[in-house]
Image: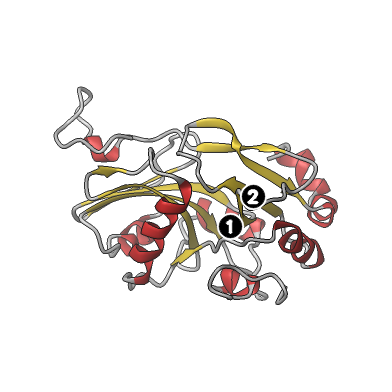
Amino acid sequence: MGEAHGKSGTPATRTIGGGGAARGRSSDGLGVSFRFIQPCCPVTAKSVPAGDDWLHELKLDGYRLQIAKHGSTVRLYGRRGHDWSKRLVALSDALRGIPAHSAVLDAELCFPGPDGAPDFFRLLKAAFTNQGGELAVYAFDLLDLNGQDLKPLPLIERRQRLERLLNRTKVTCLHLIEGFDNGQKLFEAAERHRLEGVVSKRRDATYRSGECGDWVKVKTSAWRETNRERWRLFGVR
């Protein structure tokens, strides 16, 4: 995958191996900073969009994770808003080290295999047996930072703030999913390495909850073939 490079020139392989923010409390007694934000969900496409309007990221084979930090407390939400904080205590404790008073990050929870590629079945075992010591979190968006709602900002600005935040963190399990300019080359690299695929996002897009055409996902045929049995067990993800 060395031929697919992001803005910083980092090879794609290193990427793998590598709500409102008002103060106060809500009517249900839950701090506003911890209110779950429905995630933005990409639409499925048959090909990677081309052009300068798009930024491309590897689609990692894991679980969608929303990290909500306020003070020394962290809550972890799954894609549908289930609170995983108590199930993943070690991970929650580690993410307390995010260098911000409050922040909401959109990310993917993965279990890196021996080659660095995400291993979904080992993720299942680790997540559902409360053995989260080897889990890794790959962040790709920043929705709130220190009380400022960032969702109305363009994607490229949110990512710049996310990168600055993660550059200052000492949390070893937290990584940045890098963005790439050439989506087709990234997809070809993902196909060769049997990774899940590519998510393409409009650089100027605000963050919108629910299914959104500003985000487009394309899965590789190699990943689909490898996971054919999984579709029957869990349904198409």
- Pair 1/2: label in front: 2
Residue found at the very far top of the displayed protein: 27
Q: Earlier in the sequence, mark 1 or mark 2?
A: 1
The circle on residue 203 is none
Residue plotted at (52% across, 51% down): 128
| Quadrant of residue 56 within the rendered picture | bottom right
Split into 4 quadrants, where in the image is the C terminus? Answer: top right
* Residue 214, x across and y down, in percent: 58, 38
Q: Is residue 59 visible?
A: no
**Residue 40 versus residue 53: which sits nearer the camera?**
53
The CA distance from mark 1 to mark 2 is 21 Å
- Report the coloring of the rendering: secondary structure
Pointer 1 with pointer 2, Cβ within 8 A: no
Q: Residue at x 39, y 43 (%)?
A: 153
Please state the horizontal and vertical placement of residue 72, each as a whole percent of the image: 20, 56
Q: Residue at x 39, y 35 (%)?
A: 37
Q: Position of residue 137 (x, y in %)?
A: 47, 60
| Amino acid of disc 1 | Leu
Q: Which residue shows up at 47% across the image and 61% down it?
A: 131
Residue 199 is marked as: 2
Q: Secondary structure at mark 1?
A: helix
Give coordinates of residue 51: x percent, y percent: 68, 51
- Residue holding disc 1: 123
Q: Nearer the viewer, residue 4 or 79?
A: 4
Element on which disc 2 rests: strand
Q: Nearer the viewer, residue 227 or 156?
A: 156
Left/right of residue 91 with respect to residue 204 in the rendered view: left
